[in-house]
Image: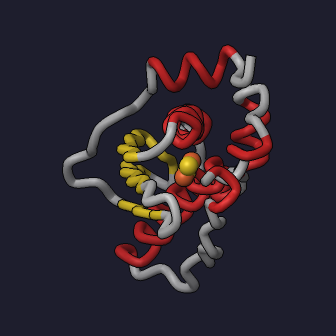
Amino acid sequence: MLYSEKVMDHFSNPRNVGEIENADGIGEVGNAKCGDIMKMYLKIDNGVITDVKFKTFGCGAAIATSSIATEMVKGKTIKDALKLTNKAVVEALDGLPPVKLHCSVLAEQAMKSALSDYYRRQGIDPVPIVGEIGECEACH
Ligand code: FES
């Protein structure tokens, strides 16, 4: 089987899908090559992520990684959420096929972009750096 059971589970039954009204931070990242877009909404209270929702227009791996990434940061402090890496997301899903590894980068970047947006809105300086979005050519 190409995909682990966990990937299939999160793809067929994604958690925390949707939008948050009056979100404290919104991040959107896209990949110019494959056109996949991920949007992440955060509710933050006292430095803790109390709610998180996402919308992904993209491949199954992108949906599964965003789903599990939301579960991994819910209830966590901003500091811990900033440590979320695409590697940790892939490990939590029991792996992804090599050509789909880059899709997990979207989840990490969307989360960081939403946290940066939160910092900006709070006027907190410096805003954590959000790196470049990984290219998608491997799967097309
Ligand atoms: Fe573009 Fe998966 S994120 S194909």
In the rendered image, residue 65, in percent from the top left (x then y), is placed at 59, 38
Q: In this view, does 132 lie to the left or right of 53?
A: right
20, 54: nearer the viewer: 54
Q: Is residue 41 left or right of residue 137?
A: left
Residue 97, by quadrant, is top right
Up the image or down, 2 lies above or below 52; here it is above
Q: Is residue 5 left or right of residue 68?
A: right
Up the image or down, 28 lies above or below 23; here it is below
30, 139: nearer the viewer: 139
In the rendered image, residue 84, in percent from the top left (x then y), is placed at 68, 51
Please identify the residue farthest to the front as the structure is shown.
140
In the rendered image, residue 20, in percent from the top left (x then y), is placed at 26, 45
| Colouring mode (rainbow / by chain / secondary structure / one colour) | secondary structure
Count of numbered marks: 0
Residue 108, by quadrant, is bottom right
Up the image or down, 124 lies above or below 111; here it is below
Please identify the residue farthest to the left as the structure is shown.
21
Q: Quadrant of the C terminus?
A: bottom right
Residue visible at 72% across and 20% down in the picture: 4
44, 113: nearer the viewer: 113
Residue visible at 65% across and 62% down in the picture: 137
Up the image or down, 15 lies above or below 97; here it is above
Q: Quadrant of the N terminus?
A: top right
Residue visible at 64% across and 58% down in the picture: 82
